Amino acid sequence: MDIASSFLGRDIVSMKDLSREDIDFILDRATEMEPIADRGSDILRGRIMATLFFEPSTRTRLSFESAMLRLGGGVIGFAEPSASSVAKGESLRDTIKTVENYSDIIVIRHYEDGAARVAADAAGIPVINAGSGSLEHPTQALLDLHTMRAAKGRIDGLKVALLGDLLYGRTVHSLLYALSNYDVKVFLVSPERLRFRRDLLKELERKIDYEEMDDLYRCLGEIDVLYVTRIQKERFPDLREYEKLKDSYIITRETLRHAKRDLIIMHPLPRVTEISTDVDDTPNAWYFKQMRHGLYVRMALLSLILGGR
Amino acid sequence: MDLVVRNGTIYTPYGLVSASIGVEDGKIAWMGRAAPEGVRVLDVDGKLILPGMIDMHVHFRDPGSPDREDFETGTMSAAAGGVTTVAEMPNTLPPVTSAERLREKRRIVERKAYVDFALVAGAGSMSRDEIKPLAEEGAIAYKMFMISRFKELAVSDADMLDNLLLIAETGLPCLVHAENEGLVSRGVERARSQGRRDPLAHSEFRLPLAEAEATARAILLAEEASVHLHICHMTSSEALALLSWAKGRGVKVTAETSPCYLFLSTDDLERLGPYGKVDPPLRGPEHQRALWQALRKGLLDVVASDHAPYTREEKERGWIDIFDAPSGSVGVETTLPLMLGSVNKGLLSLERMVEAFSTNPARILGLYPRKGCISIGSDADLVVVDTKAEFEIRGENLHSKQRITPFEGFKGRGKPILTIVRGEVIWEDGEILGRPGYGKFLSPIRRRV
């Protein structure tokens, strides 16, 4: 079976389900989507995407909606679980069973680990995970890779620092899995309290060259990519703990003086204070451009899974 | 579907897409190239569809001053200007300084509103015990005046910090009119003692320093209180520099400017007389350039009209003595065409325009994504725009009670032609089709109280 047809009807639940060959194929397809994103197309005319967001994330949802519209398809869904029968206690499985009658593909976001897998198993139509629990956000990881490749021309050989909250941030989990398919060096920079989960790191141990540290300046001079994450307030049981750590890592123009000239700075957004606004005008700032790459990657996935030409 | 808007060019933050929109129960239930069946179908022939504009700074004078404006005329004027949601200020009579007054005002204006509305609560020196109850009653934000014009809404520095600390607990933003009271009143005294009463005197003696000083003070106090500070009608390059500094420091601060400061300057004062009198005053062209730059960069978050009507009689006094005229101008109906005209001229991108006049206000007021974007599940608040049609602003066409606008005769390309609020067409090319009482009272989607 050729690789394109292997995507037909496939679920995208976890980065772990994707081989390097799969990822490269998706990224190539995403690059092909760039001109189509501008002019629009009829590739998925008559196909319908349902968005089920059990947790608010307007940015991701709008990106999926926009991707589907650009491919000529249609979008239905609900933004808040309270707007549907879920609020009345309907199980996720039953919701999926209902929604699949009206749509060709489901995009789901959920606050529980494993929810996207449950949805994918229940659904007779393909499911894309748009973020579930604290571990998985595969489309974000793919758009991060696509951004790196667009900026640097390659992924192999890059030195990448993941900075900030590595314990709770689901984007970094998926991203580290994604990067483990490439020949890269990763620096995991976080406060002791927010280090990457031990069990997950163990899984990746043999697949990726990494180093942990709490001081960015130990790797700043040699990295090509600095991936900054927010320290999410809602994940802390104790607010005082949050206040203590939130300003540990703030990137400013001064930081850049110690970095390679062509360092790119990425961030899954929304940014709070981790990156000072005076960095926005520098050529190093790639965090706004990242959004655009999200559109390309999501268009690529939708067209591959739904088999549009 | 209850309503289908076919053949639109839909605005998304990721660029424009050709699609149709389906509405059910007032919400967007479908978007796609194909058009589903609808009870009512509108074909907009490829025209641009924007999310409804959100004017987060209007004064509709209701209750209290029906000769100036009321909620019916104010919201009609909004509808005709593509504005589907307004946040209305608390300096009505009586001022909104208690939960009971908010409830009473809501009761009065609810049956008059053509568009959705939110009410801003006062947080002056007198309203400390009422701050939390106001949030519980559904206030969208608080407003405080650092000048003493509205007694019950003004704050001393000490009260300001205490109030900001209480507001921080509600999770709502605090809007401020930032000018230094002492510097402003000394300026007026000085002008009078020099015999100056001409229109230019208002600007000349009311310094950017007064604005900058109060802006700095507000920022420092807000940082201390960890509250979301929103600075109203920013006008000067000095204040912009402080805003940039504060944002760089990570202070939660946003700011707005109004079309008066973007499209008018001290060069227009002689011609406009009292109709160009606003607070803070119009500034020189160098400030105007700085404001445009800040808006393009996203340093300025919001454009809001500061629609503040006064009667002709009240304004006309200013021709003899500018200090006898009240400050304020109408604007809720003219902001969108003016901004679209600027987009057409290349002064501003469409993305920045929509962010500043719809998405960011929705975010700041806690209404996003119900308002401020075109997306599945959002309220079907839409403005259809003919980007090729020419507009010309004429006071006689305004729906406000006050029909003298400082923008008389302004022309440009890009004209709102249809306004939809929650799936109902309420204004179509010159004609009001909505009805009073249709507009809904809005409280924030999420707050901490």
Image: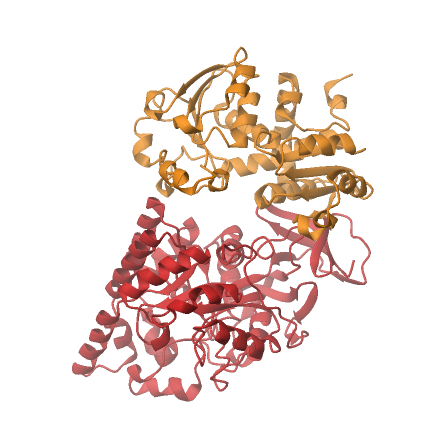
Chain colours: A orange, B red
- Position of A207 compared to B34: left or right? left
Q: Is residue B333 above or below residue A219?
A: below
The location of residue B195, given as percent across then percent down, is: 19, 83
Q: Is residue B347 above or below residue A249?
A: below
Q: Nearer the viewer, residue A97 or B71?
A: A97
Whether residue A210 can be seen here: yes
Seen as rendered, the residue at the extreme top is A206
The quarter of the displayed image where residue B417 is located:
bottom right
Q: Nearer the viewer, residue B348 or A222?
A: A222
Q: Is residue A193 above or below residue B99?
A: above
- Position of B191 compared to B63: left or right? left
The location of residue B363, given as percent across then percent down, is: 51, 54
Q: Nearer the viewer, residue B329 or B153?
A: B153
The quarter of the displayed image where residue B50 is located:
bottom right
- At horizontal 30% and vertical 58% (from top left) the residue drawn is B239
The location of residue A77, given as percent across then percent down, is: 71, 47
The location of residue A39, given as percent across then percent down, is: 65, 42
Q: Quadrant of the N terminus of chain B?
A: bottom right
- Position of B93 compared to A78: left or right? left
Whether residue A309 can be seen here: no
Q: Count the marks: how many?
A: 0
The quarter of the displayed image where residue A129 is located:
top right
